[in-house]
Image: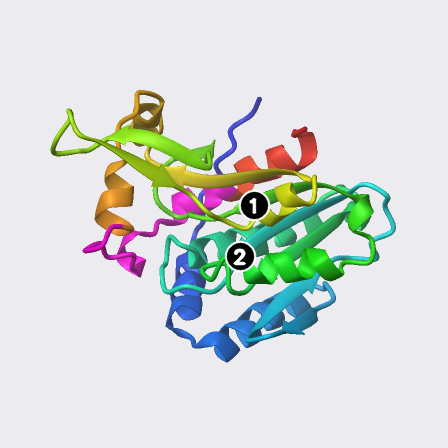
């Protein structure tokens, strides 16, 4: 397999993460919708109680639809403005390739932070839900050089107290898809040593320092190379994953 990472020559992706991060809810809808339109995709804003999903796809006719998703609510760069930008970058790269776009739906969900209400609403109303066979959900991108599949629950040893264990519950938009019997994977990026540490039940430093109670999930943590790596690794998953 060839090199997956395609380094960016500018800070355009990090700048877009920052732009989304600084915008309010309506501003984010405008930014994401405008970017999708400029890429030549249609935009459908799906309104529901207290929220709006942004849905896109080119002439979807397949009976085997794959939904690539990221939530745009929340107030973090890693969680999840970085994930939003990665999906937009995936849309751009696939548009310029030979992949059959008629089997892909791109979804930017609202209210993930509020019990996944956006994705739950979308799936409850989707007319062709029976044709959706996979969900690739991106939640947590822009830090680290390793893409990994996130589990729903971890029993981990605390960083400063190895003999103390804590339960880490991970909720994301993959959950409603699984509820409806759709094969779904939640992906995120972390430094490779932290991903390896998870296999040994070690609490990830990034989760503690960036997403913890006193953490700072701001733009200073996000790197172009991490976003580029996530984009290309996820395209491999979309094209070849099961």
Q: Residues within 10 Å of mark 1 (few under 14, many from 20)?
A: many
- The disc placed on residue 175 is 1
Residue 212 locus on image (x, y percent): 25, 50
Residue drawn at x 56%, y 25% is 2
Q: Is residue 236 magenta?
A: no
Cβ atoms at labels 1 and 2 below 8 Å apart: yes
**In the depicted structure, whether residue 156 falls above or below residue 181:** above
Q: Which residues are magenta?
A: 212-230
Along the polypeptide, which appears first: circle 1 or circle 2?
Answer: 2
Q: Nearer the viewer, residue 123 or 234?
A: 123
Residue 39 visible in the displayed image: no
Q: Nearer the viewer, residue 184 or 238?
A: 184
- The disc placed on residue 143 is none
Secondary structure of residue under mark 2: loop
Numbered marks: total? 2
Residue 233 locus on image (x, y percent): 54, 35
Residue drawn at x 26%, y 27% is 202
Residue drawn at x 62%, y 66% is 53
Horizontally, residue 72 falls left or right of residue 60, namely left
Residue 66 locus on image (x, y percent): 72, 44
Residue 132 locus on image (x, y percent): 76, 45
**In the depicted structure, whether residue 229 falls above or below residue 122:** above
- Residue with the mark numbered 2: 116
């Amino acid at each position: 397999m060839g090199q997956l990472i395609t380094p960016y020559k500018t800070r355009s992706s990090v700048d877009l993460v920052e732009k989304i991060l600084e915008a309010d809810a309506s501003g984010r809808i405008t930014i994401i919708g405008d970017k999708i339109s400029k890429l030549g995709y249609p935009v459908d804003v799906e309104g529901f109680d207290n929220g709006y999903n942004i849905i896109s796809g080119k002439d979807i006719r397949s009976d085997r639809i794959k939904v690539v998703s990221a939530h745009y609510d929340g107030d973090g760069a890693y969680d999840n403005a970085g994930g939003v930008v990665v999906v937009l970058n995936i849309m751009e790269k696939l548009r310029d390739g030979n992949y059959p776009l008629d089997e892909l739906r791109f979804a930017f969900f609202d209210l993930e932070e509020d019990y996944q209400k956006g994705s739950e609403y979308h799936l409850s109303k989707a007319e062709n839900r029976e044709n959706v066979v996979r969900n690739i959900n991106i939640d947590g991108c822009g830090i680290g050089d390793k893409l990994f599949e996130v589990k729903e629950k971890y029993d981990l040893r605390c960083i400063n107290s190895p003999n103390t264990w804590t339960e880490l519950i991970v909720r994301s938009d993959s959950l409603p898809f699984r509820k409806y019997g759709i094969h779904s994977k939640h992906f995120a990026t972390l430094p490779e040593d932290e991903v390896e540490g998870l296999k040994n039940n070690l609490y990830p430093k990034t989760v503690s320092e960036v997403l913890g109670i006193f953490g700072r999930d701001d733009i200073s943590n996000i790197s172009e190379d991490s976003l580029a790596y996530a984009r290309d690794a996820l395209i491999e998953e979309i094209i070849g994953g099961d």
